[in-house]
Image (spheres, rainbow, N blue to C red):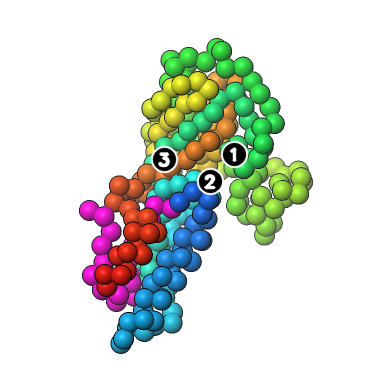
Amino acid sequence: MKFRVENLNEFKEGLVIPINKPYDWTSFDAVRKVKNLILNKFKNQPGERTKKLKVGHAGTLDPLAQGLILLCTGKATKKIQELQDAPKEYIATIELGKTTPSHDLETLYDQEYPIDHITEEFVNNTLAGFIGKQEQVPPIYSAKNVNGKRAYEFARKGLDLELKPSVITISEIELTKFNLPIIEIRIVCSKGTYIRSLANDIGKALNSGGHLVNLIRTRIGAYNLDFSVTINEFEKILTTL
């Protein structure tokens, strides 16, 4: 069942709102929009006025990615850490044979590699090697904190930066589409996993290159994208209160 709310006070008491984040929005854009919509609704409701409301998100999703983010309101903001720690599922589209410095479409291609040797069987066998606990180096074009600054601040200035690897776990990974140079994979992984880095690592493991061209987050713990609402749908829900 999709997200539902019966009255405005539920937002104060605490709700987890599963939002389908649109492409090119930051997670903070979604938080700000939803918070403003709720506060405006309170402002226009006799006897229900409030100037303050806690709203936060449980896990960042890159602007170039779409799909599920969880927004927590009121007392439910206490659940944020628990939700952030939950496993996540993604559908990732990867273009093989080319790399970019950001490992996605934020930057232009920097190198090209052969793909003639890549077969569906080779991809399946390669993906199987990514199952389990492992170290992963975050992309330099990321929000990773480095000496009080975001890594992308260094990268965009052309400064050299060496990020330390993080320990992640990939519990499931499977090939869902094979149409070279494009492959699509489904991944279930731990928090802190960068799918952009995974796309780059898969390209290397295939003796080629790879970068992420599309990403959809489909699940966070028990919350599924199928039961989420778009920003427009959320706004319509508020009109019924």
- Mark 3 nearby-residue class (10 Å; few <14, some 14–19, many ≥20): many
Residue type at mark 3: give it.
Tyr
- The residue pinned by badge 3 equals 90
Query: In the rendered image, which residue does mark 2 sit on?
Result: 64
**Along the horizontal axis of the image, is 226 left or right of 187?**
left
The magenta stretch spans residue 15: yes
Kindly report the distance in space between the C-alpha atoms of the residues bearing marks 2 and 3.
14 Å
Q: Which residue is mark 1?
A: 105
Q: Give x and y (percent) for residue 194.
A: 53, 42
Find the magenta span and give its range.
1-21
Circle nearer the viewer, 2 or 3: 2
Label 3: which secondary element: strand
Q: Earlier in the sequence, mark 3 or mark 1?
A: 3
Query: Residue placed at 49% from the left, 45% from the top?
Result: 65
Residue 217: percent from the left, percent from the top? 41, 44
Q: Are marks 3 and 1 in contact (CB under 8 Å)?
A: no
Q: Are marks 2 and 1 in contact (CB under 8 Å)?
A: yes
